[in-house]
Image (spheres, helix red, strand yellow):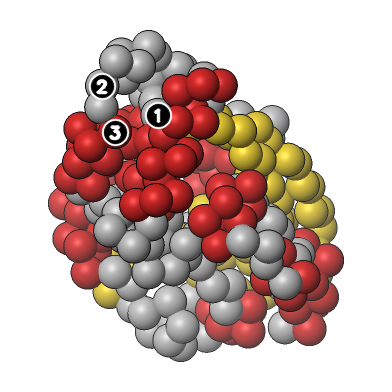
Amino acid sequence: MGQPSSRSRSRTFEDLVAEGAAVPTEGWDFSWFEGRATEERPSWGYAVSLAERLARARAALDLQTGGGEVLDFALGRAPKAPVLMVATEGWSPNVAKATALLAPRGVAVVASPDAAPLPFADGAFDLVSSRHPVQVPWPEIARVLAPGGTYFAQHVGPHSAFELVEYFLGPQPDAVRNGRDPRQERAAAEAAGLRVVEVRAEELRMEFHDIAAVVHFLRKVIWMVPGFTVEAYEPRLRSLHRRIQDEGSFVAHSTRHLFDCRKPG
């Protein structure tokens, strides 16, 4: 997300909400947020690190690739590409977007629901990657990895952006707030037979500078406020608009963790 701008300060609530509600939500390109919202990035530089690993891989799989933007960036930075490069995606608009973006790079994009078994043979890949998977199918990841293969991924951590979530939904139970805990995910990875080499976690500052950014974010990241619509949350949106106008931004915090796992060889 980009740097703040004052361009929306004089615009009405109705205009801003209409704009945020009209922006297409396909893919994981967040360039529209430039000047409207900011988010710190993790220090480890996931996409650049992924590029280095892709250059060493023979056969690689990118899970839940979204619109393919992160994989496209990493392949563009890699000195060479894997001989076999496959990506999966479960949402049909993103499948089409990822196919258009990645096919010129020789990537096969496979439509596969997030919760379904992976449609690949045992031991087919020496690298499996994912950025912000909605679900992490640890047993399937372990199954499709070759002995000695690597799972390298950046996950969304617990209570990420919960200042925004709880603004709309109210206080959430601990089971919801603490979902995606890296300790639980580590245990799940080990239970699937993977050896966890490294887990790194960071908390990162987010700022929303106008209500259009909030509307578009909640439409794009649909699991934050399930069933979000402008109509259902109009009073809360209007109140938040006034708060942003008075204070300059709405501050939240995201959490991210980096997983580096190996399948014993």
* Residue drawn at the location 77% of the way across and 62% of the way down: 182
The secondary structure type at the circle numbered 3 is: helix
The residue at which mark 3 appears reads as 13
Q: Are marks 3 and 1 in contact (CB under 8 Å)?
A: no
Q: Are marks 2 and 1 in contact (CB under 8 Å)?
A: yes
| Pointer 3 or 1: first along the chain | 3
The secondary structure type at the circle numbered 2 is: loop
The residue at which mark 2 appears reads as 11
Give the label, 2 or 1, closer to the camera. 2
The secondary structure type at the circle numbered 1 is: loop
Label 2 crowd bin: few (<14), some (14–19), many (20+), radius 10 Å: few
Q: Residue 142: x and y, percent?
A: 63, 78
Q: Quadrant of residue 253?
A: top right
Give the label, 3 or 1, closer to the camera. 3
* Residue drawn at the location 38% of the way across and 84% of the way down: 119
| Pointer 2 or 1: first along the chain | 2
Q: Residue 45: x and y, percent?
A: 61, 34
